[in-house]
Image: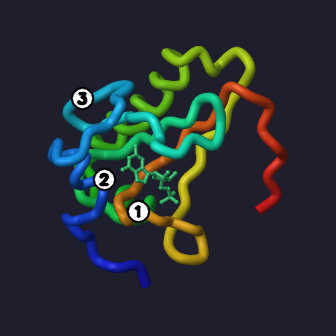
Amino acid sequence: GLPPYDDANIFARILRGEIPSKKVHEDEHALAFHDINPQAPVHVLVIPKGRYVSLADFSTQASEAEIAGFWRVVGMVAKDLRLEGAGYRVLTNIGSDGGQEVPHFHVHIFGGRRLGRMVA
Ligand code: 5GP
C-alpha cells in the first residue's frame, strides 16, 4: 500500500515555508502554487494543508470543510487564471503505478495550450 505520511516531503516543507514557492492562492485549507517544472503554459499544483498522501486518504479522513475548501480552490484558481474559456485539465497521480512523486495529496491544473488526448 501507500506509505504513511512523511512530514519531510517537499510539499510539507513548502507548507511550512522552508522552501519557497510561487503562490497563486492560499487560505486556511489549501495552497495553490506554480509547478517548478511546468508541463504546460499554466501548470499549478493545489494541495490541502492537512497531512494526506492520496485522494482516498483525503476523501476519507479530511473534514467536509477541508474537502469543500480544497475543491473550491481548484475551481477558483482555474477561473482566476482564465482557463474556463479554452479549457484545461485536472489530474492527480496516486502511488507508484500512478506515478506519484511527492507523497502529499495534490492535483495538477494544466492549461494554456491544447492538451493531448489522454487515454491512460
Ligand atoms: P507528482 O508526480 O507527484 O504528481 O508531481 C509532483 C510535481 O511536483 C511535479 O510536477 C514536480 O515538478 C513538482 N515539484 C517537485 N518539487 C517541487 C518544488 O520544490 N517546488 C514546486 N513548485 N514544484 C515541485
Answer above or below: position of 67 versus 23. Answer: below
Q: Which residue is mark 2?
A: 11
Cβ atoms under marks 3 and 1 closer than 8 Å: no
Give left or right: position of 64 versus 42: left
Tell me which amino acid carries mark 2: Phe
Q: Is mark 1 within 8 Å of ligand 1?
A: yes
Tell me which amino acid carries mark 1: Val
Other-residue count near label 2 (Cα within 10 Å), few / some / many at <14 / 14–19 / ≥20? many
Q: Which residue is mark 3?
A: 27
Q: Is mark 2 within 8 Å of ligand 1?
A: yes
Quarter occupied by residue 27: top left
Cβ atoms under marks 2 and 1 closer than 8 Å: yes
Answer above or below: position of 12 versus 111. Answer: below
Which tag, 2 or 3, sits closer to the chain's start? 2
Q: Which residue is mark 1?
A: 102
SS state under label 2: helix
| Label 3 – label 1 distance at C-alpha | 21 Å
Answer above or below: position of 84 versus 37. Answer: above
